[in-house]
Image (tube, grey):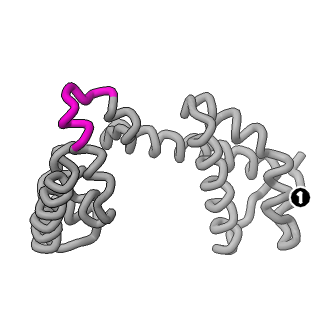
Amino acid sequence: MLEKRTDSPDQGVEEIFGVYGNMLYRIAFVMMKNAFDAEDVVQDTLIKYMEHLESGKLFETEEHRKAWLIRVDSNLCKNRLRFYKNHPKISVEQLSRYYEKEEETQLMDSLLLLPSKYSEVLLLHYVEGYQGREIAGMLGLSESAVRKRLERGREKLKRLLQETG
């Protein structure tokens, strides 16, 4: 038996979240193994749902809607996991475990005192190992702007280290 179409304009995201939110969260949590990422995935899934409805596309049945939500939720998890695998990161707090010398601790602490536009490129270049053109692509800057920020950042870092050390 075919159910009637269930997507009416008055059926909001809150109602869909109330019906399917826990299920979407459980799927995302199992895949992501992290509550924060799971919450982000569920939120992104609901955004995709709103975009889907705004485009005028309808669901044939409630089962179709549920299957669509599950597929989007799991695909978003897979995309995020693929991104994390290809772009490993380490937090500033975790970096402190790898300091072997007091000078390294002082260097990283000083680096974090710089304006973000300089610390960001310095961290990406020296800590993460990205080249100037890669940094330019990530940050939406020209390569010359990245080179200039690296140069100015090194100068500011040098002055900061001389003042504190």
- x and y percentages locating residue 3 in the rendered image: 88, 52
Residue 15 position (above or below residue 149): above
**Residue 88, picture quadrant:** top left
Count neighbours of disc 1 (C-alpha within 10 A) and say few if under 14, some if 14 to 19, many if 20 or more. few
Q: Of helix, strand and loop, which mostly describes the magenta segment?
A: helix
Left or right? Give the position of 117 relative to 64: left
Q: Nearer the viewer, residue 102 or 4?
A: 102
Q: Is residue 138 magenta?
A: no
- x and y percentages locating residue 13 in the rendered image: 78, 61
Q: Nearer the viewer, residue 116 or 68?
A: 116
Residue 164 position (above or below residue 98): below
**Which residue does the image show at 66% across and 48% down from the upper left?**
42
Q: Is residue 72 visible?
A: no
Left or right? Give the position of 27 relative to 16: left
Q: Nearer the viewer, residue 163 or 38?
A: 163
**Which residue does the image show at 70% across and 39% down from the upper left?**
25
Q: Give the magenta-colored segment's residue range.
A: 97-106
Residue receiving disc 1:
4
Q: Is residue 100 magenta?
A: yes
